[in-house]
Image (cartoon, grey):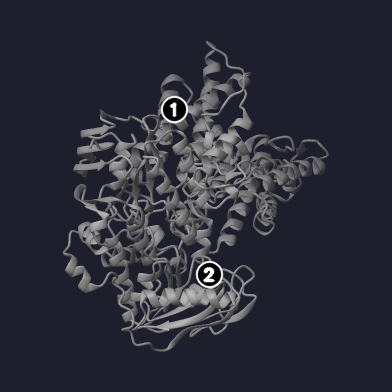
Amino acid sequence: MQPLLRMQGINKSFAGVVALSSAGLEIAAGEVHALIGQNGAGKSTLIKILTGVYRKDSGDIEFEGAPLNAQSPREAQDNGIATIYQELSLVPLRSVTENVIMGYEPRTRFGFIDWKAAHDRTREILSGFGIDIDVTRPLGSYSTAIQQLTAIARAVSLNARLVIMDEPTSSLDDREVETLFGVVRGLKARGVSVIYVSHFLDELFHICDRATIMRDGQTVAVREIASTTKLGLIADMLGRDPEEIAAAGMTDLGGGKGEAGELLLDARNLSTRRMLRDVSVSVRKGEIVGLGGLLGSGRTEAARAIFGLDRLSAGTVSTHRTPAGFSDPAEAIRGGVGFLTEDRKAEGIVPEMSVRENMTLALLPALAGKFSLDRAREEEIVKKFVDALGIKLASIEQPIRELSGGNQQKVLLARWLALEPDLLILDEPTRGVDVGAKFEIQSIIREYVEKGVGVLLISSEFEELVEGADRIVVLQDGVSVTELRNPGITEEKLIGAIAQSHEGAEA
Amino acid sequence: MLDTNAFDLRKYLQGNGQSVGVWIALVAMILFGALRYDNFTGAYNISSFLNYNSMFIAISLGMCFVIMTGGIDLSVGSVVAFTSVCVAYLSPYGIQVALPGGILAGMAIGALNAFFVIKMRIPPFIATLATMLGAKGGALVISGRQTISVDWGSNFTKFGMGNVGGLLPWSIIVVMVLAVGLWVVLEKTSIGRTVEAIGGGEDATRMMGLPVDRAKAFVYILSGGCAGLAGVILASGFGAGQPLEGVGWELSAIASVVVGGTLLTGGLGSVPATVAGALLLGLVFNILNFENGRGVISFSAYWQMVVRGMFLFVVILLQSRFSRAAAKQGA
């Protein structure tokens, strides 16, 4: 059968650096097709060539049997290829209707916008996806999931035959992910094809038919999802032997080995006005303690409260150095605590600043001499961590925004490691980074834990918690309900504990 | 690694691609003026040009720091007028009292801005708009809507009218010392880097335990102090406190900062390029005046404004081209 899209022998270089070398991609009509690979494998370059953001150096693209050479995203859209970006390109302050029909408004006889028809049409489109909302309200008043679905609805209303989704679930919770999957299945049923780019390999097994795996700018494999395993996909992405990875474990944290020492953190009965009702957690030297629970269970809020970002309404935080807890982050940092935040963009990096400046921001008070910053020591520290953590960059003066997600995350990790903390709070340390960087970040964490650092680990990936943590404190609706100990924790047991605590809370 | 601290022009240009345009334009304008007009490079023109524009450099420097934090200070023009009146009253006590007095008066209004922005969480645009109106009203009230003549008997006017070697006015020397000091603060100290970090991401900066509120207070008080200094130069150089002067000066300062490649959204800025930006805008007027002097064409003051607006547009266009080229080179 004639494929919907065929990209063949695509080559692309940027200033002499090869980004794509004879890469290819074939999508059948009505297929959900995963495109995976580590950061820098060439996924996004390939997508951007397809959607007209970049021009290819050579190669052929056929869409619906005819050659396609889109010169702009608009042209790709007019040809039936729509892209749903990770950062939504919608207007949050305007109504849902306006966002869906923008640029294609129905008109009345007098040339004015026919709002009644517009609202009706929007409602009709959204109900096709099982969404029933007030379309006259501002888009920004709805959840990220609804916003994302609105973007998809817009694409479909423009008669897209191919929808490209770039990390569509990275900011959705479990229930919202299910809604999104329903929409993807709905697209498939209408004969619309989907290219699905995601770092969450588990998802692919739920909704994808086939996967194209890229590595180093080349297409290395195309797999039927039904006849492959997660391990097989990881092996393809890394170019390694599946058995080798199986032996090493899926993650590189290796919990349950550490011998816990002196008590570093003792947080008891934490309550805040926002989320927490009664959370207790302790961390000892050389120990990784996981915070388990669903999105919204209060994991991040517990970390913020410990770090002095949110005010406690009840409860106590004491660390071995500061028995009275912290009233702001500066105090926590002086007390030997580091906090790698979940929201890398908003709370982590300062995009215009260089890698050097980003890495030493939390260290500034320590670098400040009598008069000026100790620039020589600063560069020495930065270079040490760039080497030690294997951060890939052109120069330490490069703006951090130019680095890949994994390398940005390593710079932020180095920011805290440079402070030589006793306790590190890591909130989703491997979210949005590729498999290779994930292993590296996990082994860096393990290395520091072996040196005696205590870690409070928050992760939405059960695997990372189960294999990584020595203990897992399970949270539910702002209350710490139970604690599991490694060795012996399995994903089933963790899920069981979270589910059980749900029943307990309802009872 | 021997020469990491030595000045490397190529490195500077790579790191400051966004401000290349202003330097090129500045050099081109100076060459143009020097070749076309006889007295352009004469001591009198240089001296009076620098004296007048030292005020704009001063307020642009303060503005640059405020904008780097992602804020804005609309009050500087009114603060110049207000302090010029204040120091006219102080002039009998001599420059040694009037100079610090004027700067302190400006800093006091800056502190008020800081209080509104930091403690009361009023957006900087609104907060400084309020102090702009307040300072303007204050200037008119304490002066009784009159120009207040300074005391010519004291040494007060020597500051604004005197110069070194017939070429460098005292005012520009003081302002350049200030500029160098602020350059060092921005590039070499932790408060400077905190200022830039705030503009890049206030939440991230707070998370890292950096003193966000202290740094914001610093920039608003600095901006007020710079405007105070400009007020002293104004009163001292023209021999009078002028409550009606300074209208629209804040916009000139913002223009200088932007021409110098500082992002209006904050996070990135340069002290030398801001100075160059202020000089460049001053030069446009200077050259138009010389052009009028040749008598072939005559630009009225209104047409001068139009020309200046077009010029601003061209320079900013040039800037964005250069910064895009630099970004490409970096990627």
Place of residue A351 in the rendered image (x, y in percent of width and height, measured from the top left): 43, 52
| Residue tagged 1 | B29
Q: Element at badge 1?
A: helix
- Residue type at mark 1: give it: Met
Give the quarter of the image for residue B248.
Answer: top right
**Is any part of residue B284 visible from this angle?**
yes
Residue wearing tag 2:
A297
Q: Which residue is outermost to the top?
A: B296
Observer-side mark, 1 or 2, equals 2
Q: Which residue type carries mark 2?
A: Ser
Q: Which quarter of the figure has residue B303?
A: top right
Res. B51 in view:
no
Residue B172 in the image, given as x and y percentages of width and height:
54, 42
Label 1 vs label 2: CA separation?
63 Å
Query: Relative to residue B40, is residue A115 drawn left or right?
Result: right
Closer to us: B16 or A181: A181
Q: Which mark is residue B257?
A: none
Relative horizontal placement of residue A167, taking residue A3 as reference (left or right)? right
Q: Residue A8 is drawn in which quadrant? A: top left
Callout 2: few (<14), some (14-19), or many (20+) C-alpha neighbours within 10 Å?
many
